[in-house]
Image (cartoon, rainbow, N blue to C red):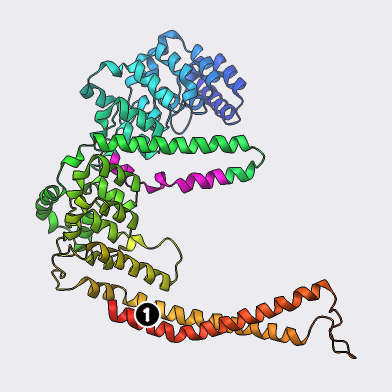
Amino acid sequence: MADNNEIETEEKIADLLRKAMMEKDYNEVRRLCREVPEELLQINSIYDDTVLHMAAHSKQNDLVLDLLKMIPEDHNHELSNIKNTDGNTILHEVAAADAMEDVAEELLKRDEDLLTASNNLGEKPIFCAARYGQSQMFVFLANKMGLQKLSPEEIKPHLRRNDGTTVLHVSMATECFGLALFIAQRYPYLIQQRDQSSMTVLQYLACNPTAFRKGNTQIRRGFIGLLNKSKFEVQKGLAKLFNSLYTVLRELVRLLVEKDTSWEVNINSQAMSLGESDKQCSSKLSPTQESSINMDKKSDESALFLATMSNIQEIVQEVLNFRPQALKYTNKEGMNILHVAIVYRHIYIFNMVIEHELLSRRLLSASDDEGNSVLHMVSQKRKSQASEKMQSPALQLRDELFCLRKVKSASKNLITNPLNKDNKTAEELFGAANERLHHDAKEWLMRTTENCTILSVFIATVAFAAIYTVPGGPNQDTGIPIRDSKPFFLVFVPADVISLTLALSSVGIFLSIHPYIRISLRRLQDISF
């Protein structure tokens, strides 16, 4: 009976502690723990969190320090063994905030084993600091672990979790680029490490185009500026912050390109070895599964190709500066960087590469495994690269023709074989690929012209009628408008004349566009379709 009463009392205290934590009544938490100090290390939530876990997760420095003082000294060694359902110790929770460095210091005084305790994923507290972008905490824990005195092979287990993901990978994934730069500079051997997907840090960065879009910072800065129009200094400070972040990102890219050793691996030979091993299990896969594996495995692509697909010009530029030999590589389809740039419609990258005449001559004359030249690639726009803008079919067709003309101008003297393996020329492929777009463009132009003509006629009718029904009407004796001497009337007359003139001119222009559209589209059809 006494045991039952004790259990009921413990459950009641646990409920009171949970309630006090949820209501942020931290004085009540202190009082309850002071009365029953053994509750400090007891599970108190459905996630197996203790009161210390919850206080650390809430970033309550003073509360955690006060609770630690209530723990008897002979229980300090238990701290590294107390974990929640994720396997996180109290130090894992503390590592998520720079402001809790003093708490981490106190915890390590009580149990140094907390430094090397791993959670269910194999993450040590320093890994959690990297994930949450806590640079100060990361440096603090690294110094406490004495990483600067260890060899690279000894350090790697501390900065990597079970699946191979490193602290550099996770800081890049969470876009903590300042911390990522620090880690890359202090532990450069992590740049070459691959995670469970066989991806390096540079490959992941090459798949994240939003990180390089200055427009995002401009939007955020503009939005905050609307909220703080009178706070010019705040806007100025934010501008400097965003510019400095972009500078850090560019420096990080430069370092990764210089140190990344994946450039030394020939993509062709890599693809061949992968192809041979894949043949053994290809019979077990359906054609759809096999195609998705071949297309979606980004680790097979170099960072240069991934950056080209994502239109990250900064990475491509750094590769041109520091690793120009990487341009000779091709992917598993035999395409070089110019093929990929055209397929994904990144004309700026195409222009960037062909500016280097010595590098571009061989690239422009090369063909892929299907015999397609760079000019053939204009007709092979990837579905995933559909235009982000809501463009009309006519404007889309204009862009496609511009791309064809651009590539044709750059490669007209360098293409050695105008036919691919299907005996198709680039113009034939272009016509077949854009036949539907050509039809939609013609229909859109005709429909738009008709609508604009109707609107122009309506405006001209109103303007013409306004001349004979002047405001105020005419004088019955003289026929002169009554408001002839009014300033408003002096403005009305020339405005009405101009409106009528422009409306009639628009009608004439739109009526003349009909035959012009037919002639122009017929010429385009003769040239490209």
Q: Position of residue 424 (x, y in %)?
A: 18, 73
Main secondary structure along the magenta-highlighted residues: helix
Label 1 Cα crowd, 10 Å radius (few <14 / some 14-19 / many 20+): few
Between 240 and 210, the residue placed more toward the observer is 240
For the C terminus, which image quadrant? bottom left
Task: Name the residue at the bottom extreme.
Answer: 477
Q: Is residue 104 above or below residue 84?
A: above
Question: Which residue is identified by label 1?
Answer: 439
Res. 176 visible in picture: no
Query: Which stretch is magenta?
Result: 202-222
Secondary element at image label 1: helix
Question: Looking at the rendering, which quadrant does residue 294 occupy?
Answer: bottom left
Q: Position of residue 475 (x, y in %)?
A: 88, 87
* Residue at the (79%, 83%) spot, across then down: 470
For the point 40% across and 38% down, the residue is 174
Residue 220 is covered by the magenta coloring: yes
Q: Residue at x 16, y 48 (%)?
A: 267
Q: Residue at x 47, y 26 (%)?
A: 97
Q: Residue 391, relative to residue 59: is it above or below?
A: below
In the figure, 79 relative to 298: above or below?
A: above
Residue type at numbered disc 1: His
Instruction: Tell me, yes or no, whether the highlighted magenta stretch contains residue 204.
Output: yes
